[in-house]
Image (cartoon, rainbow, N blue to C red):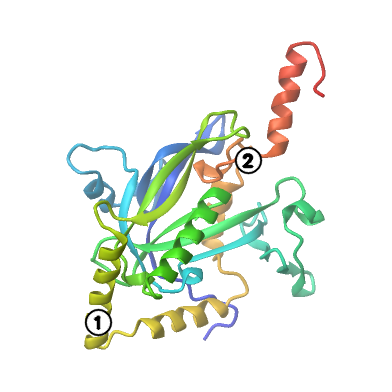
Amino acid sequence: MIKGLALTPPVIGRISIGRVVEKNGKRLPEKDDEFTLTSQIQHKDGWITHPLDETLRGSSGAKLRSIPMKLLFDDPDLNMRANYTLFNRTTGRPVCVGDGETCRRATAEGIQTFECRAPDGCELAQGSQCKPYGRLNVRIGDEDELGTFIFRTTGFNSIRTLMTRMRYLHAVSGGMLAALPLELRLRGKSTMQSHRSSVFYVDLTLRPGVTLTEAINSAKQERAAHEASGLKQADLDNAAREGLALGTFEEATEDSVAVVEEFYPQQELDDGGAGHAEIPSAKSLQSKLGRKAAALGSAPD
C-alpha cells in the first residue's frame, strides 16, 4: 500500500453548476442556473458532457435543475467531506486543510498539525486564500453501483444545506441513508450580500411524489434484500472510512489543478468559482461600494 494515498470514492463523472471560460486571455469561472453532468475528460472547450446529462434532460432538452440519485454510504461524513482548504495556486496542491479546530499543513519540515482558527482568524488565509471546500459523491443511474459523480463546492449554502439534510435523513430513517430514493435540487435565493441578485445552491430532498414514510419503507425493503444477498453496507462504510484516513490530504494533484482553476481563478469573480461559491465576499462588496462612491464624487462611509 502506498503511504499517504487517500482511497477516495470511485468517480465516473462530475456535477457542476457552471463552467470555466476564456476571457481576455484568462480562464475564469462562469456561473450557471442549472446542473451539468460531465465526464472526467476535458478538451479545449471544456469538460465533455456525460451521456446521462442528455438522458436526464429528456427529448425537450430542458434545463437540468434536479437529479435523481442515491448516496453510496450511510454515514453522512463519508458522502460529503467538507474542510477549510488552502491550495497552492501554482501547483494545485493542498497546503493546509482544517476543520475549525485543528489543521494539517504542509511545511518545510513535513506535514504538521496546528490550531485552525478558520479563514477570518488565520494569517495564512488572508486575501481569500482559504475557503470552505466540500466534495459530495452520489450515485446516478444503475450502470455502476459503486461509481459516483462528484459535486465540488466552496459555497457555505450548499455545504450547510447538504450536511443538514443528510444528518436529518440519517436520523429519521434509522441510519439507512444509502437506501433512500433522493434527488439533488438546485435552489435560488437573494440576499443583501448578493445585491438582491439570484444566487444558487444545492439541496438534497426526497424524489417528487414520495413521502418520508414511503421512502423509509422502500429503504427497509431494499436493505432487507441486500442483507439477504450478502451485501454488507456497514462493511462498505468502514472500508471507505479507513481508505480516506490513509491520506494526508484527500485531493489528488491532478484533480487539484482543475479545482484551483475553478475555485481560485486568475481573477476572483464576486460569486466565486463557477457558480459554486454563492455569497460574494465582503472585500468585493467594499470594492464595489468604493467604485460607486468614486463615481458620485464622494467617499464611502
Does 31 sit above or below residue 113? above
Q: Quarter of the image holding residue 127?
A: top right
Q: Secondary structure at mark 1?
A: helix
Q: Is residue 123 left or right of residue 243?
A: right
Q: Secondary structure at mark 2?
A: loop
Residue 187: mark: none
Q: Quadrant of residue 182?
A: bottom left
Q: Residue placed farthest to the left in the image? A: 59
> Which residue lies under the disc numbered 2?
266
Q: Residue drawn 54% across and 82% down? A: 2
Residue 118, position as x, y percentages in the image:
73, 58
Res. 115 in view: yes
Question: In this orientation, which residue lies closer to the viewer: 245 or 209?
Answer: 209
Percent position (x, y) of residue 143?
A: 23, 66
Q: Is residue 11 left or right of residue 2?
A: left
**Outermost top residue:** 297
Q: Is residue 155 visible?
A: no
Of badges 2 and 1, nearer the viewer stands: 1
**Which amino acid, by three-letter code, is at mark 1?**
Ala
- The extreme front residue here reads 213
Nearer to the camera, 153 or 252: 153
Q: Residues within 10 Å of mark 2 (few under 14, many from 20)?
A: some
Q: Pinpoint residue 243: horizontal percent, then vertical percent.
A: 50, 80
Which residue is painted at 79% across and 56% down in the image? Answer: 122
204 left or right of 299 in image: left
On the image, the x and y values in percent for residue 221 come to 23, 76
**Residue at 24% of width from left, 52% of height from top?**
209
Q: Which residue is mark 1?
A: 224
State the separation of the CA atoms marked 2 and 1: 51 Å
Query: Which residue type carries mark 2?
Result: Gln
Which residue is located at x 26 percent, y 53 percent?
52
Residue density around tag 1, few if under 14, some if 14–19, many if 20 or more, within 10 Å: few
